[in-house]
Image: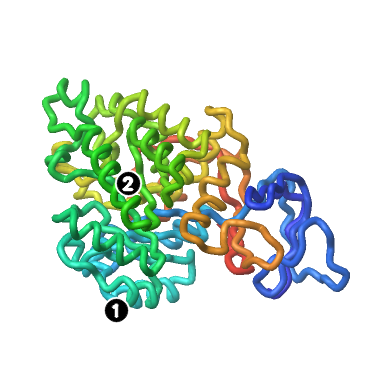
Amino acid sequence: MSTLLITAGRLIDPANNIDQVGDLYIKDHRIISRFNRPSDFSAEHTIDAKDHIVCPGFIDLSAHLREPGQTQKATILSETTAALNSGITTLCCPPDSLPINDTPAVTEFILDKVEHANAATVLPIGALTQGLEGVKLSAMVALQKAGCIAFSNDQNPIKNTLVLRRSLEYAASHDLCVIIRPEDPWLQNQGCIHEGFQASRFGLQGIPKASEIIAIQQSLTLCELTGCRIHFTQLSCHESVALIKAAKQKKLPVTADVAMHHLFFTEDALNTFDSTLHVRPPFRTEYDRQGLIEGLKTGVIDAICSAHQPHDADAKLGAFPSTEPGISALETLLPLVLKLVTEHDLSLSQGIAFITQNAAAILNIQEGNLAIGSIADICIFNPEQRWTVNEQNWLSQGRNTPFWGQTLQGKTTQVIKSGAVINA
């Protein structure tokens, strides 16, 4: 359809300081007016959004799609469909596919699969080093030209600090964003749980907070040296927030996000050895959880990501330390944002900003808003609708969520992708 009218919804657009009930007018894939009907506008389709929220489509800064190479866990089709059904219209996929996304050919393969999936937009993150081996720099400019939005070594260590410096220098010279998941691999030492009370109680190898803190300190020092734009993803420690705050006060070009699940779980949730709670970085203490929430409320942490990692059933079987870390998290992103807003004295506009406007600013893309002239990527959701996580409504191929069987509040009812209506 070329024209669409969304009526009587509560329009929330943090980028333009809008939060009021009104109409939205869409023509030829773009928003052409808010509140005021254009004189020549005739709607081919109308959506009644009364008692619903109408906001920009969500942007997820980290969602593993598993394809190419691990289609037993998930596919681009399954995960982008699940994302779109959940209001996520744009997502970034880390480079740890098989083969690694370190050549334009792999990037082009991913984007071709995305085009045929006809679902959410995917912005590939290219490998910072060849094969993610941390030894030789990847061809970042060629990867950018092929479609990569940023560069990361994901959870793989850089073997030499000089290699990290050179990669940041190269990225800075081309104004490329480098995404760092901060963890010192030697201090991590194959741990599977926070190094604290529960690790001692159960005799499990712990991961100390120092693993993350030292990695951030190292990267911030090199950021100051090189001027590279660095985005720190999936913080887990109170002290990490303090480091990012100090860096921002020094006007360093840094941003940060937190995985949604780190805002709701601590090490104390691991009493039952539920492997769906095996994540990396691990859940830490209540002190750390509160520090992360405070970081969001004060603007030190810019955004929230799903850190979506779908797994097949076998990956989560066996003793806790031998299971693979990660949570399937696309479809719980919205209800958990609403829960965060309710429990921690945030406005709904603030909560939505973490997964729209702020995420777009980190990536330097013109998305995440309802500005006139922008592409119509829109989420319409019912904040009161309750639903139970089960086989009937779960679209991700990964079933590894700690919320299985639980009832959550907040459900996407329609999604508009590039002006086209998707019935969620």
Q: Is residue 71 among the parts visible in the rendering? A: no
Residue 27: x percent and y percent?
72, 71
Q: Residue at x 47, y 59 (%)?
A: 363
Q: Which residue is mark 2?
A: 220
Q: Is residue 160 left or right of residue 269?
A: left
Image quarter where the C terminus lies is: bottom right
Image-quadrant location for residue 327: top left
Q: Secondary structure at mark 2?
A: helix
Q: Residue at x 68, y 46 (%)?
A: 52
Q: Residue at x 19, y 60 (%)?
A: 163
Mark with earlier residue (1, 2): 1
Dot 2, how many residues are within 10 Å of its Cα: few (below 14), some (14-19), or many (20+)? many
Q: Which residue is mark 1?
A: 105
Residue 56: x percent and y percent?
61, 55
Which three-letter amino acid code belongs to the residue tagged 2?
Answer: Leu
Q: Secondary structure at mark 1?
A: helix
Q: Is residue 73 among the parts visible in the rendering? A: yes
> In the rendered image of this protein, does residue 399 appear above or below residue 140?
above
> In the rendered image of this protein, does residue 276 appear above or below residue 63?
above
Residue 115: x percent and y percent?
44, 75
Q: Is residue 160 left or right of residue 21?
A: left
